[in-house]
Amino acid sequence: MREKMSTQRLALLGMMTALVFAGNYARIVLPVPVGGVPSFTLANILCVLSGLLLGPVGGLASGLGSALYDLTNPLWAAECWITFLTKGAMGLVAGAAAFAGRRSWEAKPAAYGRCLMAAAAGCLAYYVLYYLKDFFYNGMLLGGLQPQAAAVTLLALIPTSLFNGGVAILVAPPLAIAIQNALRRCGLRLGAA
């Protein structure tokens, strides 16, 4: 049976899309000698949070918000479709893991441990796709590098990836639980209509 999306949930989806978009502007670009353009950004926290709050449909907010940001920067505009898929996977996997076996958050927010594992799964999915993209697309296809050279360029991305992922895994779960508790106290639900 297909689940209808409530007006509240649709509004939260739009709000999370806007927050992910804005979160990308809070960025510190780190200079590296080779490879891509690694940076610390708040968007990863918000991508995971959208999945934890909305379930798998949160992947739409994380992918769309990040892809729209890419369209505002000529450096990343050509890859906005890849960003939509990879960042979307982060929210989708986090949401699927958080909502596994549950219809909604109506009864009570998920336990911290469940949110933590869902956040870790979302980040892992994103970074696997991100590294595959950087290896094949940026390294071999666009860069014309041999596989060994393309693999070496990935090493420069590891520190910022670990930091971004770690911060998202630590910050998003308590935020999700706090927001869920606040919504419940106000009589608002994120579940099915």
Image (spheres, rainbow, N blue to C red):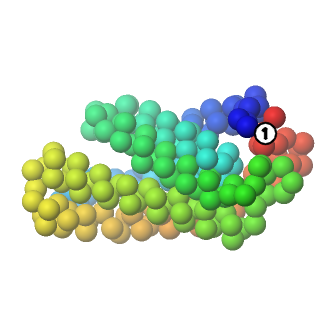
- Up-down: is 90 above or below 155? above
Quarter of the rendering containing residue 134: bottom left
Provide the residue designation for mark 1.
192
In this orientation, does residue 182 appear? Answer: no
Q: Which residue appears at 84% of the width and 57% of the height?
A: 108
In the picture provided, is 60 more to the left or to the right than 27?
A: right
**25 vs 158, nearest the viewer:** 158
Q: Position of residue 22 (x, y in %)?
A: 52, 39
Q: Is residue 69 above or below residue 185?
A: above
Local crowd size for mark 1, using a 10 Å CA cut-off: few (<14), some (14–19), many (≥20): some
Residue 159 or 125: which is nearer the viewer? 125
Residue 99 appears anywhere in the view: yes
Identify whether 128 is placed above or below 22. below
Expressed as whole percent of the image width and height from the top left, the position of residue 71 reads: 37, 31
Q: What amino acid is found at the position of numbered circle 1 in the picture?
A: Ala
Identity of the residue drawn at 81% across and 34% down:
193
**Helix, strand or loop under label 1:** loop
Relative horizontal placement of residue 88, taking residue 132 as reference (left or right): right
Q: List x then y, in percent, for residue 59.
A: 55, 44
